[in-house]
Structures are given as C-alpha cells and as structure tokens.
Image (spheres, helix red, strand yellow):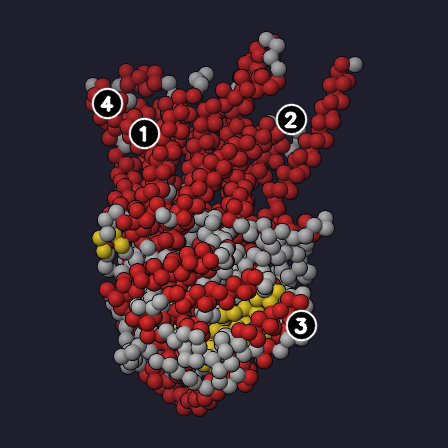
Amino acid sequence: MEKRRKRILLSLTIPAFLLIFMFMIVPLGNALRVSFFKWNGYSQKMKFIGLDNYLSIFSDKVFRTSTLNTFVYGFGSTLLQNIFGLSAAIFVNKQFKGRNVIRLILYMPIMISGVIMGAIQYYIFNFDNGVLNNLLNLFGIESIYWMKTGVRSVLIITLINSWQAMGFCMLIYLAGLQNIPKMYKEAALLDGAKKRQIFFQVELPLLMPAITTAVITNLIGGLKLYDIIVTLTNGGPNRKSLSLSYYISLLYFSDEKAGYSAAVGVALFLIIFVVAVPINQYLRSKEVEY
Amino acid sequence: MKKRIGMKQVTAMCLTACTVLASASGAAASEAADFGGKTIEIATYLSGETLAAYKEVIAGFEGETGVTVTLDEYGDDYESTMKTRMAANDLPDIFETHGWSLIRYKEYLTDLSGEAWAADLNKAALGVIQDTDGALYTLMTTGSCLGTAVNMDVCEAAGVDPWAIETWEDFNAACDKIKEAGYVPVANYFTSAGALANANGSWLSYEGEMFNDNEAMLNGTWDWENFRTILDYLQTWFDNGYLYEDCGTIKQADVIERCAKNECAFVVGIGTSFQAAVVAQNPDVTMGMIPICASQADGARFCGIGEGASFGIWKDTEEMEVCKAFLSYVAENADGINVAAGEISTLPSETTKSYGMNMMEEMESHYPEVFYDNLWDRKYMPSGMWGIFQNAAGMFCEDQSDDTKQEVIDYLKENYVDLYEAAQEE
Amino acid sequence: MEKKRAMLHTKKAGVGVYVVAAFLVLLYLLPIYVLVNQSFRYLTDLSPRLYLPEQVTLDNYLSAFTNSALWNGFKNSTIHVVEVCALEIILGGLAAYGLARAGGRLSSALRTFNICVMMIPSLSLLVGTYSLMVRFGMINKIWALSLQAAALGMSGTMFFYTSFIISIPKELDEAAAIDGAGVLGTFFRIILPQLKPITVTRLIMIAVGTWNSFAMPTYLLTDGSKATVIMVVRKAFYTAAGSVQNVPLACAMCAVALLPVIVLYIVLQRYIIEGQLDSVSK
C-alpha cells in the first residue's frame, strides 16, 4: 500500500521531468556532442576534433575574465542584494507614514526587464549628457568616463543588478523579521541581551530559512546574468565585462565558433554545478526549525 | 579585379537609363498580378526611416498583387538570428545580404543574373555583388560609400582644409592642428571593427601602396606580419592623443551625438549614413567626406563601396515566382529606400539624389582620382572575420604595446587561417 | 520625564527616516524620470538628460501609440505568459507534491537533480535547443516557446513548491489517507488550498519573468509578427547601420510598454508584495 502510494507520488513528477528532459537534458546532450566538433554554427559540415575545444579553454584569456566576472556577478550581487535588502527591510520595518509606498517603489524595478533597464541605465552612466555626469557638473566636478575600464564596467553592472533585484531580498527579510515571534525578542530582552546581541543571536538564526531562499535565488540570477549586459556595455570594453552566458552567445553568433561555444557552455555548467551543490547543502544544514 | 569608376559617369548613366525605364516599369508591374492569397516571409535589418520606406514598398507590392508579406525586423540581432536560421536551413524567402551575398550567403541564394533589373544595376553595384562567374545573388538597391567622415565646421574652426589631405602624413598634421584648437581629431570607436577592418585596406591591397597583397589574401597564404604597419600607424592616434579617452566603450550613437555637438573632426572608415545621422540630430552641422588617405603622394586614395539595402532570394523558397516579382517591384520602387538611407543609388529608378550621393559627388569634385573598391574585409577576408576584427580592435585599443600587437596579429592570423579553411571546405 | 525623552528621541529619528526615504525614492525613480524625460524630447534636443526637455513634444507618443507592432507585441506576450503560467503551476505543483511526499532516495536524488537543473544557464543550451526545435517544426510558434520556457522555469517552481509542501504537516495527508482519499484527492483537497497564497506569488513571479524574458524569444520567435513586447521595445533602441537611432521615440515606446506593467503592479501590489511576504512567512 505504502509502496503503491509512493509510486503514484513519483509518477506525478513525470510530466514535469519529461518537459525538463526534452528541453534541457536533450539540448545539453546535443551541446556536449557539438563541443567535440569544429563547427561555425550554420554550415552543414562539422569536423570532429576531439578534446581540442576543451584544451583551448585553458589558454583563453577571455574565458578567464568572463569566468571571474560571472563569479563577481553571482557572488557580488548576492552579497550586495542581501546587505541592501536586509538594510532596506529593517528600514521599511520601522513604523512611519508612507512606508508602504517606499516598499512599493523599492520593489518596482524587479517588474522591469533587464534589457530595458540596461538601455535606460545607459543614459545615466554614459559620458555625454549622462545623468550622473550632469549631477557631478552641477557641483563643479568634471565628467567621469564611468565605464572606461572593464573592472569599472563589471562593478557598475553588479551594482545595477543588485539595485534592481534588491527588492526581492528586502521582502524576504521583511517577512522574516515580521515572522519572528515577539516573545523570542522579549524573552531575550528580559535576559538582559543588547540590541546587537538580539539581532545576531536571535533574529539572524531565525532568518536563516529566508536567507537560504534569498541567497539561492540571487546566486542563480547573478550567475546567469545576461540581459542587462547586452544593452549596458555590450560586454565591452575589450570583452572585459562579459558573463560566461554572454560569452557563449557571442562565440556562437559573432565569432562563428559554435563548437567552442558549446565547450564553454559545458564548462559553465560544471562550474555552476560545483558552486551550487555545496552551497545548497551548507545552507540547508544551517536552517533552524521553529 | 580592380575597378576605377568615375562616379560622374555612374550618375550620368543612372539619369539616362532612368528615363528609358520609367516607361517600361508600368508594363512590368501589371504582369505580376495573380499571386492573391500567397504569403512570403522577408527578413530585414533595416530600422528607422529606411525601414519605413521599405515598408511602403512592401505595402505597394501587397496592394498590387494580393500577396501577404510577413516582415521580420531583426535589427541589431540580424546577423545572429540569420546564423541560427542558416543552422536550421530554414531561411526567410527573401532576406538582406548586407555585404555577404558572395562569401557567406551564396550557397543559400538564388542566382538572379537572369532578372530584368540585373542589367540595370550600375557598375558600382556590380563591382560589389557580381561573382567571378557572372552570377548575381542579390538585388542591391543602395550602396554604402565608405570613406572618412569630416565635420567641416570643426575643420574650419581649427583652420584645417580637409580637401587638401592626401596622405596619412597630411592627415596627422591636420589632426595636430585640430587638437591644438581644442577639438578631438579622430572620433573612431573601437567597439566596431571599422578602424581595423575597413580603413586599412588601402595600405595592404592596392597598387602604389606599401603592400600589394591581394593575391595572397585571397589564396590563404597572406603574411599577416604586414598588418603590423597598420597597427604601428594606428598607434600614432593613441600616442598623439587624437582619440577620445573612452574610444574603447562608446557606440556609434555616442559618436553621432558628439559630432552633432561639434566636438570632433574625423571618423575614418565609415559610410555616409553616419553623416546623415549627424545632420538629423543637428541640422546646423556641415558634414563632408574625404577618401581614406594614401600612404604616399601617388598612392590609392580609397573609398569602399559596400552593399546597402540588398535583397536575395532563398534558393529553397516555395514561392520563387512571387519572390522574383517582389524584387522586380523593389527594383522599380527603390527610390524612397535610397533617399531614406542617405546612401548612393545603384538603380536607374532611383532618381532622387540622396544625401550620400551628393556627398560623394562633392568628394569627387575634390578628388577626381579616387579609387573605388568593395569593402576591404568583404572582398579579401573570409566570412566570419568581421567579428574577429572587432575583438582585435578591442584588444588593441586597451593596450598598444609590442606584445599586444603581436597578440593581435596572432589572433587575426589564427582565425583567418581557420575561417579560410572552413570556407574552402564548403 | 522619561517618557518625554523617549518621545523626543523618536521624533528626531523621524526626520532621519524621511531623509533616507526621500533618498531611496529618488534613487529608485531616477531611471523612470530619465525615460519619461527623454520620451518628450525632439531628436535634436541634446541638452543634459538631467534637465527637462528644451521643448516638449508629444510626437513620440503619437508614433508609439499608433505602432501596430507594439500592440501586437502586447498580445503575443500575453498569450505566452498565460501558457507558461498554466504549464508551470499545474505540472510543477503536482511534481512538487510528489517530490515532497514520496520520500526515499529516489525523490531526494530527484530534488538534488532539480536544483542542479535550476542552475543551468539557458544560454548554454541555445544551440542544442534551437536545432531540436527546428527538427520538430517548433520555430515561430508561441506555444513551443512556452513549452521551452516552462521547462526552463519548471525546476524553480518545483523547488519553490517542494520546500513549501514539506513544511505542511504530513499528518494532514495521513489523516486524509485514512479517510480513504487517494493521492490526487489528497493533493487537490488538502494541499492545494494550502498552496493558494504562494501560488498567487509564484504566478506573479513566473508572469513577470516570462513577460521580461529576452534571449530565447529573440532566437525562437524570428517571425516579426510573433515578437513579444520586450523584443519590440529592444528593437526601438537598435543602432543598426543605415539609420539614426531615435532615442526619444524608443523611450516613448518603452514608456508605453512599461505603463501597463506598472499600473498592474500598483493595482495588484497587495498580492505581489503581501503575497510575497506571506509566502515566505507562510
């Protein structure tokens, strides 16, 4: 009986996994196959070259930068979003008039597509007539070439991405804060704990489930970052602000190296796998039941 | 292989031929009428005004024949989208060949040399799109003329006479003066391959120039070491401070804006649509065009002629007759497209003198011996090199040390060999 | 005395709070300001973008409103969003129930597998996906894109539901089973009502994500009449050769495209924000 039930339960997962199989696993297998070939992406001819594409990865500087950037986008955004999000949550959790409006405004950018946000932000950060430079000029400061170097572009992209998606973290933490039973805090206060102690020893552990959700969601979003780069920097200068996702699409469409692109895709898959699994396990083990 | 066409002759030819054709066009159009209910798919990268003009032509065709046209506007994503469609061997019935009718799209296209309009195309067009065996894979309605864009107002303010610039030495002397006057001399942007892939042709490929490497480029044996000369010269732009500080990140739209604000003087290796765009943003600016300089007094002062709005037919289309009728219709009604594009005309039906045509004629009056050829990369480089040049431009812009130069040359060479081999296997 | 000091303290903090609040509002509405500001400009207006236009024009909005591609884009996006939501919620919800309750090694392995799948960047699958979809004639079909998008988002939805269902006491299921309810019966009668609030949240998340997606629709919907609204707006910002980039017009189109999203956001804020809050705090 129990077995039959279990079988039925598992069979419920079939349609979903079938869809995943068809549209994710099969393409992944196909990409794996292509990665052993030299192929320009559209010709009918493919040339088998074994592991050459994978070997090329090791001497590819752009791959190295893009990987580093992907980590910055992933971990940097996660860190910033959690810090900003938590601060914003604590702020919005205060009792003041209009806090709901503030909450509404802080969450709004999430509703806007990354491609469009990148296109608009371009006019804030660009040198000529960019809003940021207009502001500087207002105070008599010379205009700045904001996105002149790769490092700066990467930081600006990380910042904008964190700015845009921060509202998600904010809500998660807000929920967490509102969800902590008052009596825990009161009990701690009675025991003579200080505010800071209460935060780190009572509130933070109880926020752990919220943090798990926030970190995982942010990390996935950050490591996959693509849209905003397309319209903001186009990966430049000198391909220094690419994410691996974007590099893969450029290799395929612009450089006509579909085989190599597929190999980089497989590498990206492995990198994310290595990063995601332990983090997930670590965070799950840290969750506090209450 | 080489052509020297006087553009005056071309224009004259256009004008005479158009009067002849004006009467013939009415008859041709009435023949193609019984396509009611059929549908064709057309892909385009055109945008803005040019697209609007193209849409008008399409609407006219639909009205006259009853054909339904689905128009795919791919814009900036045109190349990548077309590559995915080539990968799938599922192409639109008609698509734009944007300079690649011979080296990239040929195997997917129908030979159109038998069409009535094929005989009407002027030499400038044929020089670019005709294959060695006489085959013709695309209807070229406008041509881009690529040279050096000049902001005449800035030159005047700096006391520079752009028409007197003949060699790169003259060019640099002019730049020094412009810089002294407080302007930015060269507004080239290295997010595009233009500076590397288009401007340099004159040093490498033509008679009377430093190298005459055409043959070797085309048969895959070219010695890329000669490319170092180009990089060495471009380095003077950086060393002398001719360029914008952020030339590695700006896009064409930014340069257009800066030029419209009279900040900068030259953009080397760019089509006349650039000047048209500048004037659209600020009608008070006077723009001009000079050829790409020669390395010595009697060298080749070069202008590239490229495919503008050009339309080819997929060889496996199910509606070949409809497609051919459509191209005939476009050939007769392309004037609006040409005017909007601000480029040079290629067909006798194009009677309005476009902005680009005027600009080119003005240039010709100052440089009667200008040397025309296909865009350098479209003629001498294998398909796929444009993107590679773009990456190389980014590399070089970041750092002009000898090491980087070597790196750029190695990178270009490696990809050239790869892409050349791939093209031979086709 | 003590009370008074406390009151003074809160008052002082109050001013600070409003300064911070004002700063946040400016910081978060700046892009909207830039967008709207530019949308009222003439193409020739090159004055600093921080300041108001030299001269205000409504021409851009006139062209944007009469742009049939934009309206068609709204239609296509709506169809796409509805399809993806339906697929993900129904299939993902059922599967999550299975995963959460089946127990044992297999379901735990599937959950780990699911999290890995969730991490796959869709772009790395582009080549493979595209050729697959061509082979089955699934290019330029919105339903096919919806299947693909649902597959991509499915793992996230499953993860979301699974972690929630696990927190629903198993005793509820067991009680239902004792009452003779089957697996599906239990799901629909016991679990689903509990899932209602988080389903609303998840729906909104999926809808927003799908509405805003860009890369895959661009490559899989190559037929112009199938373009989504985001694709249409992105096209307006194109800088393709041979034309002037009309930024004011692009901004007007962008504003028109964003308007319904923002209006819906404000109207549905209770569900979006409160829902999100509830779903996390459960």
Rounded to the nearest whole Å, what is the CA distance between mark 4 and mark 2? 50 Å
The residue pinned by badge 3 equals B158
Residue A20 position, x and y percent, is: 29, 39
Rounded to the nearest whole Å, what is the CA distance between mark 1 and mark 2? 40 Å
The residue pinned by badge 4 equals A5
Can residue C237 be seen from the camera position used here? no
**Looking at the image, residue A112 lies above or below residue A99:** below
Q: Are marks 1 and 2 in contact (CB under 8 Å)?
A: no
Can residue B124 be seen from the camera position used here? yes
Q: Nearer the viewer, residue B398 or B122?
A: B398
Q: Give the amino acid type for the residue marked by disc 3 in the picture.
A: Ala
Q: Give the amino acid type for the residue marked by disc 1 in the picture.
A: Arg
Q: Residues within 10 Å of mark 2 (few under 14, many from 20)?
A: few
Q: Which is closer to the viewer, label 3 or label 4?
A: 3
Q: Earlier in the sequence, mark 4 or mark 2?
A: 4
Q: Give the amino acid type for the residue marked by disc 4 in the picture.
A: Arg
Q: In the drawing, does residue B89 fall left or right of residue B294?
A: left
Residue at 33% in and 55% down: A257
Occupied quadrant, residue A275? top left
Q: Which mark is residue A95?
A: 2
Q: Confirm whether circles 3 and 4 share one chain.
A: no
Residue A19 position, x and y percent, is: 28, 40
Q: Which mark is residue C111?
A: 1
Q: Which is closer to the viewer, label 4 or label 2?
A: 2
Rounded to the nearest whole Å, what is the CA distance between mark 1 and mark 4? 19 Å
Q: Which is closer to the viewer, label 1 or label 2?
A: 1
Q: Residues within 10 Å of mark 1 (few under 14, many from 20)?
A: some
SS for callout 3: helix
Rounded to the nearest whole Å, what is the CA distance between mark 3 and mark 4? 87 Å
Q: Nearer the viewer, residue B267 or A101?
A: B267
